[in-house]
Image (cartoon, rainbow, N blue to C red):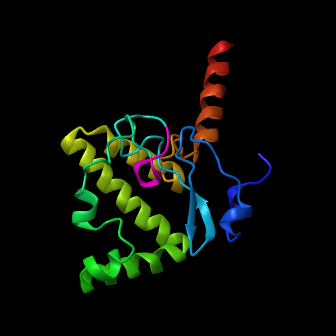
Amino acid sequence: MDHEPDDLVGEPVDDVPEREPDEYCNARRTRDGTFIGYCKRTSGWGTEGDSGRCSSHGGSGGSGDEHEGNDWAAKHGAYSDSFVQDFLTEEEIERVRQAEDLLEEPESAQALARTVAGITLEQFRRTGDERFLRRYESISDTFGIAPDDELTVNHEGLEEAFMSNLRDYHENDD
């Protein structure tokens, strides 16, 4: 790969190469026509399939006819241009703004990601729905918050105990 995503953040989206889905959706994410990163949702997230784009970036996992006659999105308004102004309450808008503020600082973003990952893990445990587990794994991978598999060992006094045992062993050898 010629460029790492961090090198491209802030570039006009038309100057950023498209990526095919692999283990991740990899769709280009933008804000005001500017590239902000590749989508790190697991491939097929939110669809019936486990491959391709996520549901937010056009993935369907089916025949492609799923949208015909489906007016659910229009009813709840999640995909309308004015979703924030027309559908969110003032309290919800404030929470969205607080989340945006938190995400500006790496430590705050990590804390928020840990909270969201914990919630999705509990959703998986409660429902058994593997989409929640995939979301948990994606959040953990993206933010590097998976638990460390290594143990921290306290070495204090270890050398002295080893040497004492070694002396006792050799004394009994004579």
Vertical relation: 6 (above or below) 55 = below
Farthest top residue in view: 174
Q: Quadrant of residue 111?
A: bottom left
The quadrant the C terminus occupies is top right
Q: Looking at this view, is 102 or 5 the one in front?
A: 5
Q: Quadrant of residue 94?
A: bottom left
Q: Is residue 113 left or right of residue 32?
A: left
Q: Quadrant of residue 88?
A: bottom left
Farthest left residue in view: 126
Residue extent of the magenta highlight: 52-58
Residue at position x 32%, y 83% in the image: 85
Farthest right residue in view: 2
Q: Looking at this view, is 105 or 18 the one in front?
A: 18
Vertical relation: 32 (above or below) 138 = below
Residue 143 is one of the magenta-drawn residues: no
Could you tell me residue 20's position as x and y percent?
Answer: 61, 42
Residue at position x 64%, y 39% in the image: 159
Could you tell me residue 1's position as x and y percent?
Answer: 76, 45
Vertical relation: 169 (above or below) 96 = above
Could you tell me residue 104's position as x and y percent?
Answer: 53, 76
Q: Is residue 123 left or right of residue 108?
A: left
